[in-house]
Image: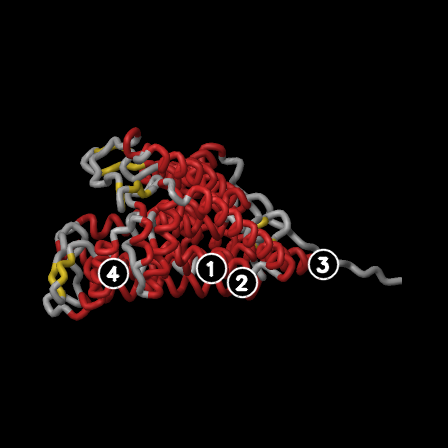
Amino acid sequence: MFAIRKEAKVDICEPELKNLKALFVLMMFFLLSAIVMPQYFGVNIGYDITCARLSNILFIMYMLASPWVFNHFLKTMLRCEIFYPMVCYLLVAGYTMVFRVDINAFFLVFFEFFLLFMMIYGCRYVIGWKRAVKGVIGCAYFLSIYGMVEFAYGKSLFLQFLSTMWTPVSNCYRSGLYRVMGPCGHPLGYGLVLLLFIALACIDLEKDEIYLFKRPILIVLLMLNVFLTGSRSTLGIAAAEMLVIMLISGRTNIKKSLLMLVAFIFGLGIFLLLFHKTGIGRYILMQITSVLDTVLGTEISAFFGADVETLNNSEAHREVLPKIFTLDWLNPWVGRGVKRGFSVEIDGIFVHSVDNYYVVQYIKYAYPGLVSYVLFMITTLVVVIKGIVKYKSVLCKLSLVAIISYFFNLWWLDSLQTLKYAYIVIAIVCAYLLSKEDEQKKNNEVNRRMRIE
């Protein structure tokens, strides 16, 4: 009789370096503080040392004390396909620094670059991608509850109590109502972060599936926070994002989601019917009708207190921004860097703030910077899509929705110092894909040895 030997299967459930306690604590601090702590909390020593930058410095010191970790970190970077377009972007930032005598033009990009790969390394080898997802979801719970408290308080608690460095950030109001901004420097930035949270809140790690209302309380709180940011583009994209998530969640979960969605809409309708004359009721109605006004060209939101003239001016301002690409006095090869201000009059509209991330990239780093960053975005999307095709991964699917939602919204907004949040999502999915590759290699090696024996 011949015995049939089954192929062995290795499952990498725990990160290999989790027992390095100091490094584990450092990476967990880095992840949580990067999400929760505002950019204006830290120490200025001629250069702002925020919690994230402190983590970067401590990790560099750790690598200098442990050359093996340093070499391992470099090898991990080289394994990532997104490394190469990021190097191109960093090179553009480097020559912009030289030509414009602007050190921040390089180092702001460098620290973003380092943050991304430090997080990939941490999520793959130290804290694990599953623990990272759980950490992000935990922070989402905290910030969504905090957002409701902040709205009730009428101003930012973070800004009031955690502002330890000079900051241009101030409390924002529209039509007499406070706009929630969480740990970000502006409500629009917080809206970008919420788009990322919404996607990850729908993952079921235990069942390895997508369900829109896996965490119903969190989803409701996140959507309320979206309303309270006062961002029309974020509200519209969040609604589309939830629809896409529902459609990719599988037949059974689609039915369950539709029932929950109907219940949610019914509950919201009852709430607005009872409290439409209160501040929060009018605020929610104003946000919904503002989106409808943008789509339909109406002015219904004026009935609920919206400053229609300001909203229309904002729309007109955004419409002329792409014409900045045609300005002949902007150098198309060498950008202006980050320290120089920018203002221009186009078609009778005075542009002093550029609410379009891609136009901002052109202003700062010219076409080479814009093209290299778009190449990074495309590479990221290709990597995630490959993960979906190869592993049928729900994490990759939700990350793809989150990343597209975030970068799509940047056509109407600048990044407002929120790129680190998008990079955390990208880092988690890259760490997951690296772990799957290593798992596959170990399985192949084990099976090869079994066949030899």
Identify the residue position indicated by label 1 in the image: 400
Identify the residue position indicated by label 3 in the image: 7
Label 2 or label 4, whichever lies nearer to me, is: 4
Amino acid type, label 2:
Ile
Q: CA distance from mark 3 to mark 4?
A: 61 Å
Give the residue displayed 55% in from the left and 54% down from the top.
262
SS of the residue under disc 2? helix
Q: Residues within 10 Å of mark 3 (few under 14, many from 20)?
A: few
Amino acid type, label 3:
Glu
Q: CA distance from mark 1 to mark 3?
A: 33 Å
Residue 299's x, y, as percent? 30, 59
Q: Is residue 341 above or below residue 43?
A: below
Amino acid type, label 4:
Glu
Identify the residue position indicated by label 2 in the image: 388
Q: CA distance from mark 1 to mark 2?
A: 9 Å
Q: Is residue 93 left or right of residue 265?
A: left
Identify the residue position indicated by label 4 in the image: 315
Give the residue displayed 31% in from the left and 65% down from the top.
297
Colouring mode (rainbow / by chain / secondary structure / one colour)? secondary structure
Q: Nearer the viewer, residue 299 or 156?
A: 299
Q: Are marks 1 and 3 in contact (CB under 8 Å)?
A: no
Residue 64's x, y, as percent? 36, 39
Q: Are marks 1 and 2 in contact (CB under 8 Å)?
A: yes
Q: CA distance from mark 4 to mark 1?
A: 28 Å
